[in-house]
Amino acid sequence: MSDKTDRAAAVMAALAAMYPDARCELDFADPFQLLVATILSAQSTDVLVNKVTPKLFALAADPAAMAALAPETLENAIRSIGLYRNKSKNIAATAAMLVRDFGGQVPRTMEELRRLPGVGRKTANVVLGVAFRIPALPVDTHVLRVARRLEFTGADTPDKVEEDLTALLPPATWIDAHHRLIWHGRRRCKARKPLCPDCGCRLFCSYGK
């Protein structure tokens, strides 16, 4: 084991101690609802999405019902979410594709998930890891920022950061690492005014020192 992987393991142990209950903060009942919630979360917050999805899923909780919604009904249900018109079109098109091409089921591979409208690599990774417990490490703005500050990567694109992190960490740890890095970014390692004095990773972090 290299010094780099030893250090990564130590950091992950510190994060595990700080966030033992880290998990996805989107509310959902099944893989389809997680998929929709993750599409909605782009350039929005989980808190705001969780305020919108109960009403949306009361109208349509599965792909067939979602595909059958009138466009204006779907738009009105998510109007408080940023980019709601574009997201409404993607959700409707994704629901229709799931019914038509996948028997109404959310697929379990990166390639098939990325065929769905509005689904990029990060969203697909969230579904794989959270819904199906398939090793995946989604990279959002929090993960990217924290990974750079902890010097796990020098990259500035999500795909490259994901590549660097998955090369550094064992696959069995990817899902938990994703959640803990996000929680750390939201709670302590904030974009502005990070709470470095109150950080269990400070010993390993040049940025915090």
Image (cartoon, grey):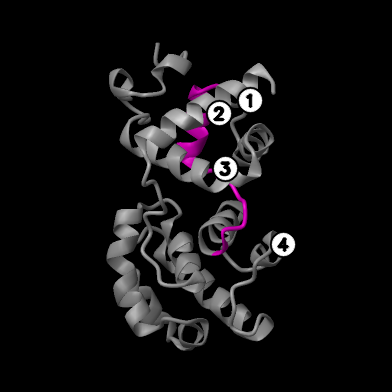
- Distance between the alpha carbons at the discs numbered 1 and 4: 29 Å
What's the CA distance linking mark 4 and mark 3?
22 Å
Residue at the spot of label 3: 173
Crowdedness near tag 1: few (<14), some (14–19) or many (≥20) residues, C-alpha within 10 Å: some
Sequence-first tag of 3 and 1: 1
111 lies left or right of 177? right
Earlier residue among tags 4 and 3? 4
Q: Amino acid at mark 1?
A: Thr
Disc on the earlier residue, 1 or 4: 1
**Closer mark to the observer between disc 1 and disc 4:** 1
Q: Residue at x 54, y 48 (%)?
A: 175
> Amino acid type of disc 4?
Glu
Residue 185 in sight from this viewpoint: no
Mark 2 and mark 3: Cα distance apart in space: 10 Å
As helix, strand or loop, the secondary structure at mark 4 comes to: helix
* Magenta-highlighted residues: 132-151
Residue placed under numbered mark 2 in the picture = 9
| Amino acid at circle 3 | Thr
Q: In the image, which disc is placed on residue 111?
A: 4
- Mark 4 Cα-neighbour bin, 10 Å: few <14, some 14–19, many ≥20: few
Q: Quadrant of the C terminus?
A: top left
Q: Position of residue 55 (x, y in %)?
A: 29, 76
Tell me the crowding category of disc 2: few under 14, some 14 to 19, or many 20 or more residues within 10 angstroms, Cα based. some
67 relative position to 57: left or right: right
Q: Identify the element where label 1 is drawn.
A: helix
State the residue at coordinates (47%, 82%): 62
Q: Let me know if residue 135 is in the magenta part.
A: yes
